[in-house]
Amino acid sequence: MAQRNEDLTVGEMLRRHGISRRGFIKFCTAAASAMALPPLMGPAMAEQLRNVRRPSVVYLSFQECTGCLESLTRSFAPTIESLIFDVISLDYNDTLMAASGEAAEAARTQAMHDNFGKYVLVVDGSVPTGAGGGYCTAGGKSAEDILREAAKGAAAIVCVGTCAAFGGIPFADPNPTQAWPVTGIVGDKPIINVSGCPPIPEVITGTLLQFVSTGKVPDLDEHRRPKVFFGNTIHDRCYRRPFFDEGKFAKSFDDEGARNGWCLYELGCKGPTTYNACATLKWNGGTSFPIESGHGCLGCSEPGFWDKGSFYSALSNPAWGKAGEASPSEVLKLAGGAAVAGVAIGAASAAVSRMRQHRQEEQAVDNDPKGG
Amino acid sequence: MDLLSFARGAGLKFALAVFCVGVVWRIVAFALLRIRRDLNEPRASMLKSLGGGLLAVGTRSWPHPEFIGRTGAGEALGYSYHLGLFAVVLLFGPHITFFGSLFGLTWPALPSSVITVISVLTFTLFLAVLFRRVTHPVLRMLSNFDDYFSWFITMLVIVTGLAATAHIGGPYETLLGLHILSFDALLVWFPFGKLMHAFYIFPSRAINGSLLARKGAIS
């Protein structure tokens, strides 16, 4: 009788897919390297993973654009990162799975039942709670109910993307669907946030791989992001940093400074306040990242990046206007109003002073022995 | 809302409003004060009195030859850190971008390395100014809370600015947030403390000079 896929060890599954031991060690070494683990951890991780039963992963998609999953699958150019799908048993993902409708929901329920307390729950997208949860439903259940039910038996929850981690675009003011990040709904489970819009594929696979190979939650920062990937700012590792230190800034996207690769700080780059690995891991197999392509960092892996003012206003600029920055006309309006108030208070204060002066002079005349 | 968003958002807006209200309030209140009528015969015409006022702005801004030995060092110190502050505030690239977004005007910047050197020099001069204030017997007696607090708040902006530029002492967003927040605090304090001398110093010299010229006592 043929062995069921979910009962296979990782090694057996890889052999069945024609992936060599060398190829798998290469994958684990790349992941270990991305996580800044010692070089020997790659083969050790590979050996450990080969002999374990593939961990069950339930991947829930809520209020999202599928960009995170697109980042992970990289369907147009499969790379070694796609091996993650051979390391894990992806028991439910409504975008990738062939099944649909009741069959798909049954697969999720079955996987959660069979692996209760052991499966990894991956969440992609924010959870809308407005309209009784009616903004996002699957199988007749609201996203919130599905999340609460799935979280009960999860060993850990990995929030993939800024929507699941911090609420994302749906959470942006005025948050019409009353969306919440996963941390706003679930409070009693280990939660790892892999933020980014979308996150770097190696960061998603690296985080999943570290958890399934060690069974432990990695060191996290104050936003529950793995420190190994989110420990430094983009600015700290940016190849344009020397230009910042020299004070060489591009003033527009097509000036001489921009052509010379100068710092994009004055064009609104959020690299100095954004913690992510874009400047080191880069994108598309290490080809490039937004700043290398000539555009400033948007700060997409930070909480509330969409509500922090214009993407094209320098970090040190005022940020209170309608467009996310103070325009001269708004400043003029503020200063004009303040000046009118100042004139009124100043005139009142001068009137009081004049009255006091007048009284003092009268008293001086009254007290003068030579007077009157 | 994080510190940086508050500092450059609501905090800065509030500080600018207080600054504008306060400065206009104090200038108007000062301008509308009643000047005691001088019943003496004028020793100079109206035009000469005004000229005397302008002359006083120049002569009172420079050490008197007779006292240069006693006041020269203090004045040199004062001028040096004021020039340092002007350069740092008005000729640093990110500051120019800041003013550009507020007023729509920009101008050429000095290289950041030059600004850093000037900032460190200004910081050192600020320390020297404080040392002089607390060690000089007369100056110490003349000083009050206003002097020390105005010194402190200006120094705070310099120190947080240096830390933010050099990324020393914490994450950049915190340092930049503290820098802008300290600037907000300076704007709020400005009209109500001795920092207001920036607006008063030349008009008051001109008025005094003009009154003295009218009495034939300008030198």
Image (spheres, coloured by chain):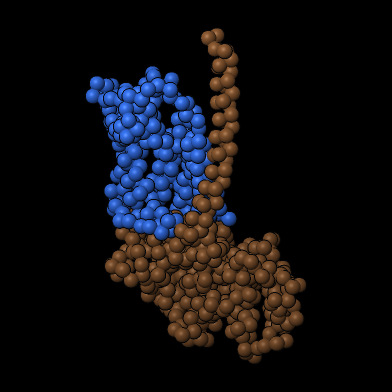
Chain colours: A brown, B blue
Q: Residue at x 37, y 47 (%)?
A: B89
- Quadrant placement of the C terminus of chain B: top left
Please say whether residue A286 is visible from this viewpoint. yes
Give the answer, above or below, for where A11 lies relative to A350.
below
Would residue A257 appear left or right of B186 to someone viewing this image? left
Residue A137 place in picture, x, y as percent: 71, 78
Residue A85 place in picture, x, y as percent: 54, 79
- Quadrant placement of the N terminus of chain B: bottom right
Please say whether residue A45 is visible from this viewpoint. no
Name the residue furthest bottom. Answer: A1
Give the answer, above or below, for where B207 lies relative to A28.
above
Q: Residue at x 59, y 84 (%)?
A: A96
Would residue A178 appear left or right of B82 to someone viewing this image? right
Q: Residue at x 45, y 37 (%)?
A: B196
Q: Is residue A274 or residue A94 the one in the foreground?
A: A274
Q: Is residue B41 or residue B178 the one in the foreground?
A: B41
Name the residue furthest left. Answer: B65
Residue A349: quarter of image: top right
Residue A274 place in picture, x, y as percent: 47, 61
Residue A355 place in picture, x, y as percent: 59, 29
Q: Is residue B189 or residue A138 the one in the foreground?
A: B189
Give the answer, above or below, for where B214 lies relative to A281.
above
Residue A54: quarter of image: bottom right
